[in-house]
Amino acid sequence: MKSLAIFGSTGSIGRQALSVAEFHKEEFSVRVIAANSNADAVSKQIECFHPEYVGMYSPDSAKAIRERFPEVTVVSGEEINALAALPEIDTVVNGVSGFAGLAPLLSALNAGKTVALANKESIVCAHHVVDDALNRFGGRILPVDSEQSAIFQCLEAGRREDVRSLILTASGGMFREFSREQLQKVTPEMALHHPTWSMGGKITIDSSSLFNKGLELMEAGWLFGFGPDDIKILVHPQSIVHSMVEYRDGSVLAQLAEPDMRLAIQYALTYPERQTSQLRKLELSKLCTLSFFEPDCEKFPAIPLAYAAFRDGETLPIAYNAANEVAVEFFINKKLGFTDISACVRHVMNKIPCIARVDSADKVYSIDADARRLAREFCENTSSRRNG
Ligand code: NDP
Ligand code: MG
């Protein structure tokens, strides 16, 4: 039986990871759950899965859980990350949203754990630090992001030196057919609705702005060791082909399935085995069309900005991510327009002082803090210009 720690247990990925653990009860035992502040959801999960340890980032929520479940060890604040390194844990599922996912990832990898990684922001910002921890402590990352899981599966079919390119598919988001004028009028309510996937708020907005794909471009590069010239992005609105690998003989291998994150989560948890799953069977004969086309980089600057950040590979990926996180928060609070998100990211990437090698967690945290400050200034100025 594998012992799991589920970080971000109350979110979209966390709940689906618990659903996989429940479906394969005989294979998995959930010994740690960790979240930010949602004590009600965590209470229900404790009743259902009986973990021995709970991490609640918010001290108030931790107190509420401690009072309700005196038999459970409950920790709060940064201490929750130590739960990813407990000796009794085999695999850590990282479903924390945003840059906050870096701390549990590093904690797990520094203890040599296997991490089923959904959180992409962490590897985008700290790939040297992540590689260093993998090399020193012998842990492993198994991808959960559906595109990365697809690439991982397609790479297993051939030799690395025979790969010509990776092809990342993108749903293209809700607004792929919008004009520039229509994009300027997009509201948070409109952007929080995704056509094919049901996900947390931040990634749903990132999917409609294509910042999610920009992050995934870098995530793929650093997970699998490919550069910006080796990875292409194709819009594929049906979200059936989850990504592809092109080999030098002209073969293109693709992974297809119904869009359901439980598949990628389960594959990361059972790898290298394949088990039965809760997925609906893919009825190929009922699919009318599978279409693919190039993304519109003028309407969606998230893509060219991501290639620029990827080429730098040091400071700019952190700036890209931090500025996007800040701008998305302003957008959700109706203090920034949808198209201002990419303007904010471009501004921060232009302003941030670049350093040659970002090879320590301290450097990552310091650049992230600088980038957030620049992004907040930009958002506040843009917001007051609008209202003034
Ligand atoms: P959600 O917003 O649904 O969930 C986020 C989770 O993170 C919640 O459990 C939240 O707790 C928890 N959390 C937030 N901050 C902290 C913290 N400091 N410490 C511990 N837990 C914290 O996000 P998603 O599940 O949609 O996404 C999670 C990650 O997975 C993202 O990086 C996303 O890009 C990636 N991903 C998601 C996919 C999806 O289908 N949803 C697909 C592929 C990748 P609380 O509820 O208490 O606030
Ligand atoms: Mg994805």
Image: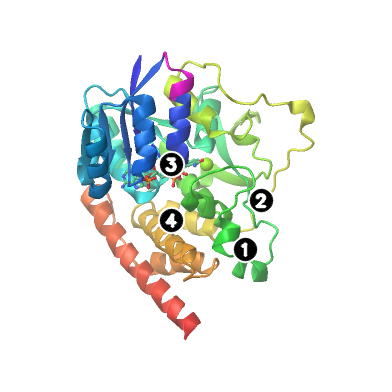
Q: Residue at x 36, y 55 (%)?
A: 318
Q: Which residue corresponds to mark 3? A: 11
Q: Nearer the viewer, mark 4 or mark 3?
A: 3
Locate residue 273, reporting x and y percent: 48, 15
Q: Nearer the viewer, residue 276 or 152?
A: 276
Packing grade of label 1 (10 A; few <14, some 14-19, many >=20) is some
| Separation (CA) of disc 4 from disc 1 | 18 Å
Magenta highlight on residue 127: no
Locate residue 331, reporting x and y percent: 48, 65
Q: Nearer the viewer, residue 353 or 229?
A: 353
| Mark 4 or 2, nearer chain start | 2
| Mark 4 or 1, nearer chain start | 1
In the displayed structure, would residue 330 be above or below residue 210? below
View extreme (bottom): residue = 388
| Mark 1 or 3, nearer chain start | 3
Q: In the rendered structure, find residue 309 and report the number of the disc placed on it.
A: 4
Q: Residue at x 38, y 67 (%)?
A: 375
| Mark 4 or 3, nearer chain start | 3
Q: Nearer the viewer, mark 4 or mark 1?
A: 1
Q: Quadrant of residue 372?
A: bottom left
| Separation (CA) of disc 4 from disc 3 | 28 Å
| Separation (CA) of disc 1 from disc 2 | 12 Å
Q: Is mark 3 within 8 Å of ligand 1?
A: yes
Q: Which residue corresponds to mark 2? A: 294
Q: Nearer the viewer, residue 220 or 30?
A: 30
Locate residue 137, reporting x and y percent: 23, 28
- What's the amino acid at mark 1? Lys
In the displayed structure, would residue 133 be above or below residue 329? above
Q: Which residue corresponds to mark 1? A: 299
In the displayed structure, would residue 289 be above or below residue 112? below
